[in-house]
Image (cartoon, rainbow, N blue to C red):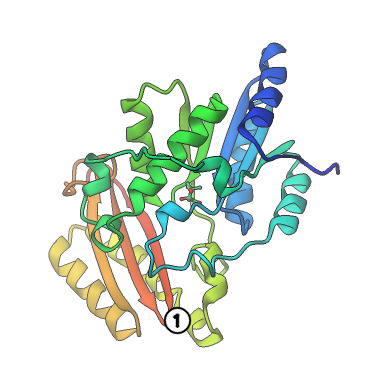
Amino acid sequence: MSQPMVLNTVADLRRQLARWRARRETVALVPTMGALHAGHISLGTIAKSRADHVVYTIFVNPTQFAPNEDFSAYPRTFADDCAKIAELGAEAVFAPTPAVMYPEGFATTISLTGPATAGLEDRFRPTHFAGVATVVAKLLIQAMPDLAVFGEKDFQQLAVIRQLTRDLDLPITIAGGPTLREADGLAMSSRNVYLSSEERATAPLLQRVLSEAAAAIQAGEDAEHVLNYGRERIAQGGFALDYLEWRDAKSLGLASRNKASRLLVAARIGKTRLIDNVGVAAGV
Ligand code: PAF
């Protein structure tokens, strides 16, 4: 099991990718902020099955955190991350510093509408998607991979990235990887390490509410009633609810029963904010 090569500059990244491209080999990118868990590794497995080479990026992007958020506390576990990447058999990690990504004088930010303004995460994190879109656009342009893989757990983020890739004519396939869950249903997240043992015991409630609400909507129950009941259960379970919404799976606009849709939730427990989502089948 050989260690992945660690590339710290855009020039190093491009030099390595050019070597592979010269041999007509394909490249998949897995952008992350590190603190890798099994969910991130499953994205790498998808990447590996669809390209000759896999490059992880590890960069805790300061511009997607608001000043009151957890940028400095965000877990940083680079050596462990590299060991996991090596075990998977991915060859390279691009790990730029903030100065590489945002050199002195940096002055460009992507401005978004569409799924980025659907009234979900954007309502509670108004500057978040501009930061995500700008860093993801930079990573995609720096690497120009054939494929990039992102987790469905950040469902609105995935929709924003698909939109920006289309709008900027980037010749890159965007793939979504299903959310991986702990045995009790909690969605895997780098932020789960913040949970106290009591909060950790409560946290799977979000997934239970989502799956029961999805089943109720699929069974034909009134959606507003189902959502209100779910909201009450989450609040009574000890969470401060940001939202529980039923949306169209593509546009993130209002859902309809004859198109694929998604239930999405965000709620805070103690100091930790958790998000999750599940699919609702079309034709219900
Ligand atoms: O999902 C994440 O880890 C981040 O938002 C991403 C896509 C790597 C951009 O910093």
Q: Is residue 153 visible?
A: no
Q: Is residue 2 visible?
A: yes
Amino acid type shown at disc 1:
Thr
**Does 89 appear above or below 178?**
above
Q: Quadrant of residue 57?
A: top right
**Does 268 appear above or below 245?**
below
Viewer-side residue, 279 vs 268? 268
Q: Does ligand 1 reach within 8 Å of label 1's beta carbon?
A: no
Classify residue 265 as left or right of residue 2.
Answer: left
Q: Position of residue 215 (x, y in %)?
A: 30, 61
> Label 1 belongs to which residue?
202
Q: Position of residue 1 (x, y in %)?
A: 86, 44
Q: Secondary structure at mark 1?
A: helix
Name the residue: 25% across, 72% down: 230
**Does 153 appear above or below 115?**
below
Callout 1 crowding tier (Cα within 10 Å): few <14, some 14–19, many ≥20: some
Name the residue: 66% across, 16% down: 21
Name the residue: 44% across, 40% down: 105
Viewer-side residue, 7 vs 101? 101
Number of dots carrying numbers = 1
Viewer-side residue, 134 vs 205? 134
Q: Position of residue 71 (x, y in %)?
A: 49, 64
Classify residue 178 as left or right of residue 211.
Answer: right
> Farthest residue in the right direction?
1
Q: Position of residue 239 (x, y in %)?
A: 34, 80
